[in-house]
Image (cartoon, grey):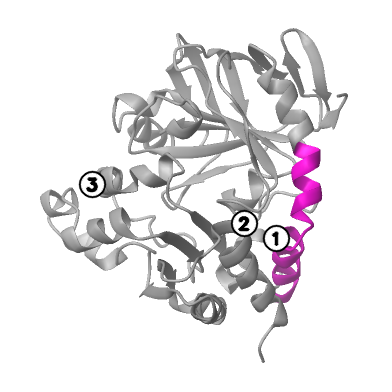
Amino acid sequence: MADPRDRQLAELLVDTCVGVQAGWQVLVVGTVPGRPLLEEVVRVVAERDAYALVRVGFGGNWSSRTWLRYAPIERVAVPAPIESHALETCDALIVVEAPENTRDAADIPGDRMAAFQGAYRPAMERVFRHELPWVGCQYPTPGLAQEAGMSTDEFADFLYGACLRDWDAERERMQRYADRFDAAEEVRIAGTETDIRLSIAGRSMKVDAGGANIPGGEFFGCPVEDSAEGTIAFTEFPAVYGGREMSGIRLRFEGGRVVDASAETNEDYLLETLDSDEGARRLGELGIGCNPGITRYMKNTLFDEKIDGSIHLALGQSYTSIGGQNTSAVHWDIVKDLRAGGRIELDGQVVQQDGAWSI
Protein backbone atom coordinates (compact mmCIF):
# COMPACT_ATOMS: atom_id res chain seq x y z
CA MET A 1 0.00 0.00 0.00
CA ALA A 2 1.41 3.39 -0.98
CA ASP A 3 2.39 5.72 1.86
CA PRO A 4 1.08 9.26 1.09
CA ARG A 5 4.09 10.65 2.95
CA ASP A 6 6.31 9.45 0.10
CA ARG A 7 4.58 11.92 -2.21
CA GLN A 8 5.06 14.73 0.34
CA LEU A 9 8.73 13.86 0.75
CA ALA A 10 9.23 13.65 -3.03
CA GLU A 11 7.73 17.12 -3.51
CA LEU A 12 9.99 18.45 -0.75
CA LEU A 13 13.06 16.97 -2.46
CA VAL A 14 12.18 18.04 -6.01
CA ASP A 15 10.60 21.45 -5.39
CA THR A 16 11.94 22.87 -2.12
CA CYS A 17 15.40 21.34 -1.94
CA VAL A 18 16.40 21.23 -5.62
CA GLY A 19 13.90 23.48 -7.40
CA VAL A 20 13.70 21.40 -10.58
CA GLN A 21 12.95 23.43 -13.71
CA ALA A 22 11.52 22.39 -17.08
CA GLY A 23 14.09 20.68 -19.29
CA TRP A 24 16.55 19.90 -16.50
CA GLN A 25 18.47 16.63 -16.49
CA VAL A 26 18.05 15.28 -12.96
CA LEU A 27 20.18 12.38 -11.73
CA VAL A 28 18.02 10.25 -9.42
CA VAL A 29 20.23 7.80 -7.56
CA GLY A 30 19.25 5.04 -5.15
CA THR A 31 18.97 1.35 -4.39
CA VAL A 32 16.19 -1.18 -4.92
CA PRO A 33 14.59 -1.03 -1.43
CA GLY A 34 13.94 2.69 -1.91
CA ARG A 35 11.78 2.12 -4.99
CA PRO A 36 8.51 3.57 -3.53
CA LEU A 37 10.16 6.95 -2.87
CA LEU A 38 12.26 6.82 -6.05
CA GLU A 39 9.08 6.27 -8.10
CA GLU A 40 7.44 9.29 -6.48
CA VAL A 41 10.54 11.41 -7.12
CA VAL A 42 10.56 10.37 -10.77
CA ARG A 43 6.83 11.14 -11.03
CA VAL A 44 7.28 14.65 -9.61
CA VAL A 45 10.30 15.31 -11.86
CA ALA A 46 8.19 14.22 -14.85
CA GLU A 47 5.35 16.50 -13.80
CA ARG A 48 7.83 19.39 -13.74
CA ASP A 49 8.66 18.68 -17.42
CA ALA A 50 12.20 17.55 -16.63
CA TYR A 51 14.26 14.44 -17.37
CA ALA A 52 14.69 11.84 -14.61
CA LEU A 53 17.97 9.96 -15.22
CA VAL A 54 17.60 7.01 -12.86
CA ARG A 55 20.57 5.12 -11.38
CA VAL A 56 19.38 2.21 -9.22
CA GLY A 57 21.92 -0.21 -7.74
CA PHE A 58 21.91 -3.30 -5.56
CA GLY A 59 24.39 -2.09 -2.95
CA GLY A 60 26.09 1.26 -2.84
CA ASN A 61 24.46 4.26 -4.45
CA TRP A 62 27.40 5.01 -6.73
CA SER A 63 28.96 1.64 -7.41
CA SER A 64 28.30 -2.04 -6.95
CA ARG A 65 29.88 -3.28 -3.72
CA THR A 66 30.86 -6.43 -5.63
CA TRP A 67 32.77 -4.35 -8.17
CA LEU A 68 34.53 -2.42 -5.41
CA ARG A 69 35.61 -5.67 -3.77
CA TYR A 70 37.00 -7.38 -6.86
CA ALA A 71 38.14 -4.78 -9.39
CA PRO A 72 41.89 -4.02 -9.45
CA ILE A 73 42.53 -1.10 -7.13
CA GLU A 74 44.23 0.71 -10.03
CA ARG A 75 40.87 0.62 -11.85
CA VAL A 76 38.94 1.65 -8.72
CA ALA A 77 41.16 4.75 -8.52
CA VAL A 78 40.12 5.89 -12.02
CA PRO A 79 36.59 7.28 -12.49
CA ALA A 80 34.34 5.84 -15.18
CA PRO A 81 34.14 8.58 -17.86
CA ILE A 82 30.38 8.14 -18.33
CA GLU A 83 29.68 8.59 -14.61
CA SER A 84 32.03 11.56 -14.35
CA HIS A 85 30.33 13.18 -17.33
CA ALA A 86 26.90 12.68 -15.75
CA LEU A 87 28.01 14.27 -12.46
CA GLU A 88 29.75 17.15 -14.22
CA THR A 89 26.90 18.01 -16.59
CA CYS A 90 23.61 17.14 -14.85
CA ASP A 91 21.37 20.00 -13.69
CA ALA A 92 20.44 18.47 -10.33
CA LEU A 93 21.15 15.43 -8.19
CA ILE A 94 18.75 13.59 -5.86
CA VAL A 95 20.09 10.66 -3.81
CA VAL A 96 17.84 8.27 -1.87
CA GLU A 97 19.76 6.01 0.51
CA ALA A 98 17.88 2.79 1.25
CA PRO A 99 20.33 0.16 2.52
CA GLU A 100 19.29 -3.42 3.14
CA ASN A 101 22.43 -3.87 5.26
CA THR A 102 23.99 -0.74 6.75
CA ARG A 103 27.30 -2.57 7.18
CA ASP A 104 27.51 -3.92 3.64
CA ALA A 105 30.77 -2.06 3.01
CA ALA A 106 32.45 -3.29 6.20
CA ASP A 107 34.66 -5.81 4.36
CA ILE A 108 35.88 -3.35 1.72
CA PRO A 109 39.46 -2.34 2.66
CA GLY A 110 39.95 1.29 3.55
CA ASP A 111 42.45 1.87 0.76
CA ARG A 112 39.87 0.74 -1.81
CA MET A 113 37.19 3.00 -0.40
CA ALA A 114 39.62 5.94 -0.30
CA ALA A 115 40.69 5.25 -3.89
CA PHE A 116 37.07 5.20 -5.06
CA GLN A 117 36.16 8.40 -3.21
CA GLY A 118 39.28 10.13 -4.48
CA ALA A 119 38.54 9.09 -8.05
CA TYR A 120 35.20 10.90 -8.10
CA ARG A 121 36.17 13.90 -6.00
CA PRO A 122 36.90 16.11 -9.07
CA ALA A 123 33.49 15.24 -10.56
CA MET A 124 31.89 16.12 -7.21
CA GLU A 125 33.43 19.58 -7.01
CA ARG A 126 30.15 21.23 -7.97
CA VAL A 127 28.55 19.52 -4.99
CA PHE A 128 31.23 20.74 -2.59
CA ARG A 129 30.96 24.27 -3.98
CA HIS A 130 27.15 24.09 -3.75
CA GLU A 131 26.98 25.00 -7.43
CA LEU A 132 24.90 21.92 -8.26
CA PRO A 133 21.38 21.76 -6.80
CA TRP A 134 21.42 18.48 -4.89
CA VAL A 135 19.83 16.69 -1.97
CA GLY A 136 20.30 13.43 -0.14
CA CYS A 137 17.75 11.62 2.00
CA GLN A 138 16.89 8.16 3.26
CA TYR A 139 14.00 5.74 2.87
CA PRO A 140 12.87 3.70 5.89
CA THR A 141 14.24 0.19 5.35
CA PRO A 142 14.38 -2.66 7.85
CA GLY A 143 18.18 -2.31 7.90
CA LEU A 144 18.04 1.32 9.02
CA ALA A 145 15.29 0.52 11.53
CA GLN A 146 17.27 -2.36 13.01
CA GLU A 147 20.36 -0.18 13.34
CA ALA A 148 18.27 2.37 15.25
CA GLY A 149 16.76 -0.30 17.50
CA MET A 150 13.24 0.34 16.19
CA SER A 151 10.54 -1.50 14.31
CA THR A 152 10.30 -0.57 10.64
CA ASP A 153 6.97 1.22 11.13
CA GLU A 154 8.30 3.10 14.16
CA PHE A 155 11.38 4.17 12.24
CA ALA A 156 9.24 5.30 9.29
CA ASP A 157 7.17 7.52 11.59
CA PHE A 158 10.37 8.94 13.07
CA LEU A 159 11.91 9.57 9.63
CA TYR A 160 8.88 11.34 8.17
CA GLY A 161 8.43 13.33 11.40
CA ALA A 162 12.01 14.61 11.20
CA CYS A 163 11.76 15.39 7.47
CA LEU A 164 8.26 16.82 6.95
CA ARG A 165 8.55 19.96 9.07
CA ASP A 166 7.83 23.67 8.64
CA TRP A 167 11.23 24.43 7.18
CA ASP A 168 10.56 28.16 6.80
CA ALA A 169 10.06 28.45 10.56
CA GLU A 170 13.05 26.23 11.28
CA ARG A 171 15.23 28.34 8.98
CA GLU A 172 14.25 31.56 10.74
CA ARG A 173 15.06 30.07 14.16
CA MET A 174 18.43 28.64 13.15
CA GLN A 175 19.43 31.79 11.28
CA ARG A 176 19.39 33.70 14.57
CA TYR A 177 22.01 31.37 15.99
CA ALA A 178 24.04 31.32 12.76
CA ASP A 179 24.16 35.14 12.69
CA ARG A 180 25.70 35.14 16.16
CA PHE A 181 28.39 32.71 14.99
CA ASP A 182 29.07 34.88 11.93
CA ALA A 183 29.76 37.81 14.25
CA ALA A 184 32.31 35.80 16.27
CA GLU A 185 35.93 34.92 15.68
CA GLU A 186 36.47 31.91 17.95
CA VAL A 187 34.38 28.91 18.97
CA ARG A 188 35.20 26.94 22.09
CA ILE A 189 33.58 23.56 22.74
CA ALA A 190 34.00 22.26 26.28
CA GLY A 191 32.79 19.21 28.17
CA THR A 192 33.99 15.94 29.63
CA GLU A 193 37.47 15.22 28.25
CA THR A 194 36.86 18.02 25.74
CA ASP A 195 38.29 21.49 25.37
CA ILE A 196 38.84 22.58 21.79
CA ARG A 197 39.05 26.02 20.16
CA LEU A 198 38.40 26.77 16.50
CA SER A 199 38.71 30.00 14.55
CA ILE A 200 35.78 30.96 12.34
CA ALA A 201 37.11 34.46 11.62
CA GLY A 202 36.13 35.50 8.11
CA ARG A 203 33.99 32.40 7.63
CA SER A 204 30.19 32.24 7.45
CA MET A 205 27.70 29.64 8.66
CA LYS A 206 25.14 28.06 6.34
CA VAL A 207 21.69 27.06 7.55
CA ASP A 208 20.38 23.69 6.39
CA ALA A 209 16.58 23.91 6.44
CA GLY A 210 15.24 21.92 3.52
CA GLY A 211 18.41 22.10 1.47
CA ALA A 212 21.15 19.62 0.64
CA ASN A 213 20.16 17.18 3.39
CA ILE A 214 16.75 15.90 4.38
CA PRO A 215 16.14 15.96 7.23
CA GLY A 216 17.64 19.40 7.66
CA GLY A 217 18.10 20.92 11.06
CA GLU A 218 21.67 22.16 11.40
CA PHE A 219 23.85 25.10 10.58
CA PHE A 220 27.46 24.58 9.66
CA GLY A 221 30.66 26.30 8.65
CA CYS A 222 34.30 25.58 7.87
CA PRO A 223 36.83 26.38 10.62
CA VAL A 224 40.06 28.09 9.60
CA GLU A 225 42.21 25.15 8.56
CA ASP A 226 45.16 25.68 10.91
CA SER A 227 43.18 26.88 13.93
CA ALA A 228 41.99 23.79 15.81
CA GLU A 229 43.73 23.49 19.18
CA GLY A 230 42.86 21.12 22.00
CA THR A 231 41.14 17.82 22.57
CA ILE A 232 37.72 16.35 21.91
CA ALA A 233 36.29 13.03 23.09
CA PHE A 234 33.43 11.48 21.13
CA THR A 235 32.44 9.15 23.96
CA GLU A 236 28.65 9.52 23.97
CA PHE A 237 27.94 7.74 20.68
CA PRO A 238 29.84 5.31 18.44
CA ALA A 239 30.91 6.74 15.09
CA VAL A 240 30.25 4.84 11.87
CA TYR A 241 32.29 5.33 8.71
CA GLY A 242 32.79 3.05 5.72
CA GLY A 243 30.50 0.45 7.30
CA ARG A 244 32.69 0.20 10.42
CA GLU A 245 31.79 1.25 13.94
CA MET A 246 34.29 3.00 16.22
CA SER A 247 33.53 3.86 19.85
CA GLY A 248 35.39 6.14 22.21
CA ILE A 249 37.16 8.24 19.57
CA ARG A 250 39.53 10.82 21.07
CA LEU A 251 41.38 13.40 19.00
CA ARG A 252 44.03 15.97 19.89
CA PHE A 253 44.66 18.90 17.55
CA GLU A 254 47.67 21.16 17.20
CA GLY A 255 47.88 23.81 14.51
CA GLY A 256 44.64 22.55 13.01
CA ARG A 257 45.91 18.99 12.53
CA VAL A 258 45.13 15.76 14.38
CA VAL A 259 48.41 14.87 16.09
CA ASP A 260 47.09 12.14 18.37
CA ALA A 261 44.11 9.84 17.85
CA SER A 262 42.70 6.80 19.61
CA ALA A 263 39.53 4.72 19.71
CA GLU A 264 38.26 2.02 22.02
CA THR A 265 37.23 -0.13 19.05
CA ASN A 266 38.50 -0.32 15.45
CA GLU A 267 41.35 2.07 16.21
CA ASP A 268 43.37 0.73 13.27
CA TYR A 269 40.63 1.81 10.87
CA LEU A 270 40.47 5.25 12.48
CA LEU A 271 44.20 5.73 11.96
CA GLU A 272 44.01 4.33 8.43
CA THR A 273 41.29 6.84 7.57
CA LEU A 274 43.26 9.72 9.06
CA ASP A 275 46.20 8.73 6.87
CA SER A 276 44.09 8.57 3.68
CA ASP A 277 45.59 11.84 2.48
CA GLU A 278 47.06 15.08 3.82
CA GLY A 279 43.68 16.74 4.33
CA ALA A 280 42.09 13.91 6.31
CA ARG A 281 43.70 15.09 9.57
CA ARG A 282 42.25 18.59 9.31
CA LEU A 283 38.69 19.79 9.91
CA GLY A 284 36.39 20.49 7.00
CA GLU A 285 33.28 21.37 8.97
CA LEU A 286 31.81 22.42 12.29
CA GLY A 287 28.09 21.66 12.47
CA ILE A 288 25.50 22.49 15.14
CA GLY A 289 22.49 20.14 15.44
CA CYS A 290 19.10 21.85 15.90
CA ASN A 291 16.32 19.52 14.69
CA PRO A 292 13.69 19.29 17.49
CA GLY A 293 12.33 16.13 15.88
CA ILE A 294 15.63 14.31 16.50
CA THR A 295 16.37 13.77 20.18
CA ARG A 296 17.99 10.32 20.28
CA TYR A 297 20.97 8.59 18.73
CA MET A 298 20.08 6.43 15.71
CA LYS A 299 23.52 5.14 14.65
CA ASN A 300 22.76 7.03 11.44
CA THR A 301 24.86 10.12 10.71
CA LEU A 302 22.25 11.79 8.49
CA PHE A 303 19.99 12.03 11.54
CA ASP A 304 22.52 11.99 14.40
CA GLU A 305 24.33 15.12 13.20
CA LYS A 306 21.01 17.00 13.54
CA ILE A 307 20.31 15.94 17.16
CA ASP A 308 19.07 19.03 18.99
CA GLY A 309 21.87 19.87 21.44
CA SER A 310 24.73 18.19 19.58
CA ILE A 311 27.70 19.33 17.51
CA HIS A 312 29.67 17.48 14.90
CA LEU A 313 33.13 17.92 13.47
CA ALA A 314 33.92 16.62 9.99
CA LEU A 315 37.41 15.44 9.22
CA GLY A 316 38.53 16.08 5.66
CA GLN A 317 36.89 17.84 2.73
CA SER A 318 35.45 21.31 3.41
CA TYR A 319 32.88 23.37 1.54
CA THR A 320 34.56 25.90 -0.73
CA SER A 321 31.29 27.78 -1.25
CA ILE A 322 31.43 29.03 2.35
CA GLY A 323 35.17 29.66 2.55
CA GLY A 324 36.59 26.21 3.29
CA GLN A 325 40.00 25.42 1.84
CA ASN A 326 40.72 21.88 3.01
CA THR A 327 40.85 19.15 0.36
CA SER A 328 40.48 15.44 1.02
CA ALA A 329 38.78 12.32 -0.30
CA VAL A 330 37.39 11.95 3.23
CA HIS A 331 34.42 13.81 4.70
CA TRP A 332 33.57 12.15 8.01
CA ASP A 333 31.05 13.73 10.39
CA ILE A 334 31.58 12.66 14.02
CA VAL A 335 28.86 13.62 16.50
CA LYS A 336 29.26 14.81 20.10
CA ASP A 337 26.34 15.23 22.53
CA LEU A 338 26.51 18.43 24.61
CA ARG A 339 23.25 17.94 26.52
CA ALA A 340 24.90 16.60 29.69
CA GLY A 341 27.58 19.03 30.79
CA GLY A 342 28.75 20.44 27.47
CA ARG A 343 28.85 24.05 26.36
CA ILE A 344 29.61 26.25 23.38
CA GLU A 345 31.37 29.60 23.80
CA LEU A 346 31.74 32.35 21.21
CA ASP A 347 34.61 34.74 21.92
CA GLY A 348 34.44 33.73 25.58
CA GLN A 349 30.65 34.07 25.98
CA VAL A 350 28.60 30.96 26.73
CA VAL A 351 25.86 30.71 24.09
CA GLN A 352 24.75 27.14 24.73
CA GLN A 353 24.87 25.11 27.95
CA ASP A 354 23.67 21.51 28.22
CA GLY A 355 22.10 21.82 24.77
CA ALA A 356 20.02 24.91 25.68
CA TRP A 357 20.61 28.21 23.88
CA SER A 358 21.09 31.47 25.77
CA ILE A 359 20.96 33.71 22.70
What residue type is disc 3 on?
A: Ala
Residue 230 percent across, percent down from the top left:
57, 11
On the rendered structure, is 26 left or right of 237?
left
Q: Earlier in the sequence, mark 2 or mark 1?
A: 1
Q: Earlier in the sequence, mark 1 or mark 3?
A: 3
Q: Residue at x 30, y 57 (%)?
A: 89
Compared to residue 87, the image places residue 256 above or below, namely above
Compared to residue 267, the image places residue 255 above or below, namely above
Q: Residue furthest front?
A: 22
Secondary structure beneath disc 1? helix
Circle 3 residues within 10 Å: few <14, some 14–19, many ≥20: some
Task: Check residue 166 for magenta coloring.
Answer: yes
- Kindly report the distance in space between the C-alpha atoms of the residues bearing marks 2 and 1: 6 Å
Q: Is residue 349 visible?
A: yes
Nearer-the-camera pick, 304 or 200:
200
Residue 110 percent across, percent down from the top left:
30, 44
Q: In the rendered view of the protein, which quadrant contains the N terminus? A: bottom right
Give me the disc on residue 163.
Answer: 1
Magenta-colored span: 153-174
Circle 2 residues within 10 Å: few <14, some 14–19, many ≥20: many
On the rendered structure, is 323 left or right of 310?
left
Residue 296 percent across, percent down from the top left:
75, 49
Give me the disc on residue 119.
Answer: 3
Residue 18 percent across, percent down from the top left:
54, 59
Secondary structure beneath disc 2? loop
Q: Which residue is mark 2?
A: 214
Compared to residue 164, the image places residue 268 above or below, namely above
What residue type is disc 1 on?
A: Cys
Q: Residue furthest bottom?
A: 1
Q: In the rendered view of the protein, which quadrant contains the C terminus? A: top right
